[in-house]
Amino acid sequence: MKISPLTGAATVTGAAAAAKTTAVQGAAGSMDFSKGLTSAINNLTNIQDNADQLVTQMATGQNTDIQQVVLAVEKANMALQTSVQVKNKVVDAYTEIMHMQV
């Protein structure tokens, strides 16, 4: 039995690096917030769609590489958890700004 190396781990690390780059660009003012948000949501949708497609292929017997399926599902899970945490931070910041005295 041959075990193939994990290639998806680099993708997750690359996604984190891309998120940092986007955040730095946004802080510098070179990227529009709405464009960055739209890009992040589109990226999340693509990751989830890929995982759904692989799960469907696995369920129908078309894909037999369970390692690839599990990796895609976990990547989608991590991306969703990260986006929920970002949303929570934005809501907290908005609430804090609304409580400020003028």
Image: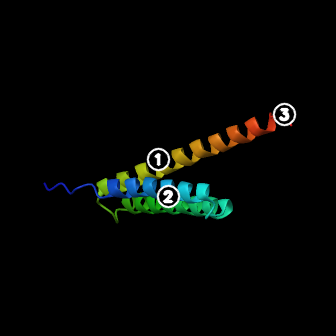
Image side of residue 48 versus residue 13, left or right = right
Between 68 and 58, the one lying in front of the other is 68
- The percent position of residue 80, horizontal first and vertical second, equals 53, 49
What's the amino acid at mark 1?
A: Met
Res 41 quadrant in image: bottom right
Q: Secondary structure at mark 3?
A: loop
For the N terminus, give its image quadrant: bottom left
Q: Secondary structure at mark 1?
A: helix
> Along the polypeptide, which appears first: circle 1 or circle 2?
2
Residue at 84 percent across and 33 percent down: it is: 101
Point out which mark residue 78 bears: 1
- The percent position of residue 75, horizontal first and vertical second, equals 43, 52
Q: How is the image coloured?
A: rainbow
> Along the polypeptide, which appears first: circle 2 or circle 3?
2
Between 70 and 31, the one lying in front of the other is 31
Q: Which residue bears the numbered disc 2?
A: 21
Point out which mark residue 88 bears: none
Disc 1 to disc 2, how far (Cα)? 18 Å
Between 35 and 44, the one lying in front of the other is 35
Residue at 86 percent across and 37 percent down: it is: 102
Disc 3 to disc 1, how far (Cα)? 37 Å
Structural crowding at the residue carrying mark 1, measured as other residues with C-alpha within 10 Å and reported as few (<14), some (14–19) or many (≥20): some
What's the amino acid at mark 3?
A: Gln
> Along the polypeptide, which appears first: circle 3 or circle 1?
1
Between 44 and 24, the one lying in front of the other is 24
Q: Which residue bears the numbered disc 3?
A: 101
Disc 2 to disc 3, how far (Cα)? 33 Å
